[in-house]
Image (cartoon, coloured by chain):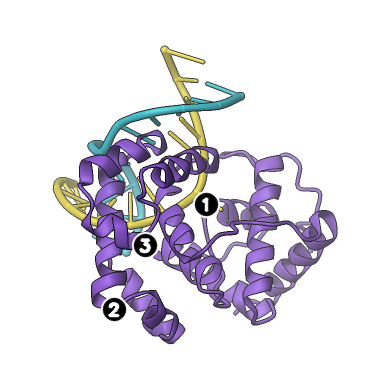
Chain colours: A purple, B yellow, C cyan
Amino acid sequence: MSASSSFKIRQLVQALESRYGKIPWWPGDYDEVMIGAILTQQTRWANVTKALDELRRRDLSTLAAIRVADIRGIEEAIRCTGFYRMKAQRLKNLAVFVEVTCGGIDMMAAMSTPALREGLLSVHGIGEETADSILCYGFSRPCFVIDAYTDRVVRCIGVTEPRNRLKPLFEHVLPKTDEACRQTHAHIVEYAKEFCGKNRCDACILVNSNG
DNA sequence: GACCAGGTCCTTG
DNA sequence: CAAGGACATGGT
């Protein structure tokens, strides 16, 4: 574990905290967070909220409902998020995992974080980011989400660890609470949208990258 | 019209 | 194992 990377990330976390303070991010019940986590894959959140509204309108806003619904109706409801065919199938897969494999939300909530993470990752269509989002924002576990924005922002402040080292790095630096994980991740996304384009970071104002 | 969005899986070399 | 492509609609 690189000491200088830890230091830079500590600086980043503090600078973001003082810049943005407390911001609400991804409120909602278990079902909404899990469904949203699939729908937001490679997709803007604004389009996800439209799809969530449409799902609610069709009484498809729970995984229990999604599990038994005609997949075409799900596809129609979520079309505006793109990749809608694939995502409809992924929602079905997740619904089977939750309702059948686990035996319902309550059983899921009683699982240990490692067991729940492993289970989620076994679902076809759920990768690390989606699993960790569900763990952190849905099940309030102290689990830090690494996404494209996180990757971009840490490069911007001079951290060179490979992407697969970032999660343990952040979890080492942050307090072991879901609140810390969700706030910092939300901050990073806000900052990235404001200052870090895909192939540039022309306003890295938070942390001196020579540190 | 080009480019990108809070990824994941599959196929190639 | 890295790199590239497919999935698809909607906003800037």
- Judge by depth and name the residue closer to the eye, A198 or A180: A180
Disc 3 to disc 1, C-alpha distance: 13 Å
Disc 2 to disc 3, C-alpha distance: 21 Å
Do the dots labelled 1 and 2 sit on one chain? yes
Q: Secondary structure at mark 3?
A: loop
Amino acid type shown at disc 2: Gly
Amino acid type shown at disc 1: Ala
Residue at the (47%, 66%) spot, across then down: A30
Do the dots labelled 2 and 3 sit on one chain? yes
Work out whether A148 lies above or below A57.
Answer: below
Residue at the (58%, 77%) spot, across then down: A142
Asked if one can make out residue A42 in the rendered structure from this viewpoint, the answer is no
Provide the residue designation for mark 3.
A127
Sequence-earlier tag: 1 or 2: 2
Residue at the (59%, 51%) spot, across then down: A152
Question: How many marks do you count on the picture?
Answer: 3
Q: Secondary structure at mark 1?
A: helix
> Which mark, residue A75?
none
